[in-house]
């Protein structure tokens, strides 16, 4: 199993910043999702976030919401997503991190869900609607099964809460760059620089920054501010959805490569 933490350790030894692209499974279709995972892995991705389409997303902006809606209209379900992971994970070197809301986990049962995703080849989990106070129900069995659960730090988090999240998060710490949902933004909030400094003072775990990064210039800025990883979602989902699946794949290959070059 490919470990998120080990990947970060390898990158740190080479003074590299990680690139973590995000795509929504099943948009525009599952066959393209499988190809997109390989394309991203071949064009600079150090790990990939794969979003499970969900009907009531809390953290997703309009681009990713629309992608999830399109996937759901094609009846894409968790089993379909895991089938894609099973197919692709053995072919790529990078860890796959599943991005899912808690309801599918609750519905399947925590241990059953974790075992299923582990068997499929998933390395890590991001569950944006699972608060720290209730995370133990997932964190403990995930650690035993070998799935790294990454927790999110919001810009509004107190120092006490930042410390608590940093202590519990596995793989890395996901720093949300804005108060709000995901989406393409013209510039990065300057407060991210201070938040990164605060987090680095609290922990030696890697810190990834996401929400709103949509250009190579912004990715470089986040890296220069001290991030260990740059997470890019909406800007990739948008490119993959435009035109034919073939043109979308070419677009994300080019964009992913430009992002990696910017932070190398």
Image: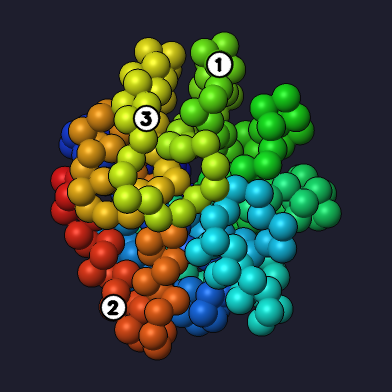
Residue at the spot of label 3: 192
Q: Earlier in the sequence, mark 1 or mark 3?
A: 1
Asked whether disc 2 touches disc 1, contact meaning CB atoms under 8 Å apart, the reply is no
Depicted 160 relative to depicted 101: above or below: above
Q: Residue at x 27, y 28 (%)?
A: 226
Q: Earlier in the sequence, mark 3 or mark 2?
A: 3
> Is label 3 or label 2 in front?
3
Asked whether disc 3 touches disc 2, contact meaning CB atoms under 8 Å apart, the reply is no
Mark carried by residue 250: 2
Q: Residue at x 22, y 53 (%)?
A: 216
Q: Earlier in the sequence, mark 2 or mark 1?
A: 1
Relative to 201, is 33 on the left or the right? right
Q: Residue at x 50, y 50 (%)?
A: 182
Depicted 113 relative to depicted 159: above or below: below
Q: Is residue 233 visible?
A: no
Along the line of sight, which residue is nearer the eye, 23 or 221? 221
Depicted 239 relative to depicted 11: above or below: below
The x and y percentages for residue 162 are 53, 19
> Is label 2 or label 1 in front?
1
Q: Secondary structure at mark 2?
A: helix
The x and y percentages for residue 238 are 42, 69
Residue at the spot of label 1: 158
Q: Residue at x 44, y 76 (%)?
A: 241
Residue 142 figure quarter: top right
């Amino acid at each position: 199993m490919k470990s998120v933490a080990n990947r970060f350790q390898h990158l740190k030894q080479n003074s590299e910043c990680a690139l973590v692209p995000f795509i929504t499974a099943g948009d525009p279709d599952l066959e393209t999702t499988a190809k997109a995972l390989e394309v991203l892995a071949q064009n600079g991705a150090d790990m990939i976030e794969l979003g499970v389409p969900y009907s009531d997303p809390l953290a997703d902006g309009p681009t990713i919401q629309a992608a999830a809606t399109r996937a759901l209209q094609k009846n894409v379900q968790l089993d379909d997503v895991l089938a894609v992971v099973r197919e692709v994970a053995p072919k790529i070197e990078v860890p796959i991190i599943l991005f899912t809301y808690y309801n599918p986990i609750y519905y399947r049962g925590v241990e059953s869900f974790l075992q299923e995703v582990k068997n499929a080849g998933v390395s890590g989990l991001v569950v944006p609607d699972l608060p720290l106070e209730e995370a133990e129900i997932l964190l403990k069995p995930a650690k035993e099964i070998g799935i790294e659960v990454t927790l999110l730090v919001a810009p509004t988090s107190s120092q006490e809460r930042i410390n608590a999240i940093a202590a519990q998060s596995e793989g890395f710490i996901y720093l949300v760059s804005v108060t709000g949902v995901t989406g393409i933004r013209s510039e990065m909030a300057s407060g991210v620089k201070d938040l990164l400094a605060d987090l680095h003072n609290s922990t030696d775990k890697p810190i990834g920054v996401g929400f709103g990064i949509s250009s190579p210039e912004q990715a470089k800025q986040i890296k220069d501010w001290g991030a260990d990883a740059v997470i890019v979602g909406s800007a990739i989902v948008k490119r993959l959805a435009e035109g034919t699946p073939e043109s979308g794949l070419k677009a994300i290959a080019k964009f992913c490569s430009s992002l990696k070059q910017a932070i190398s």
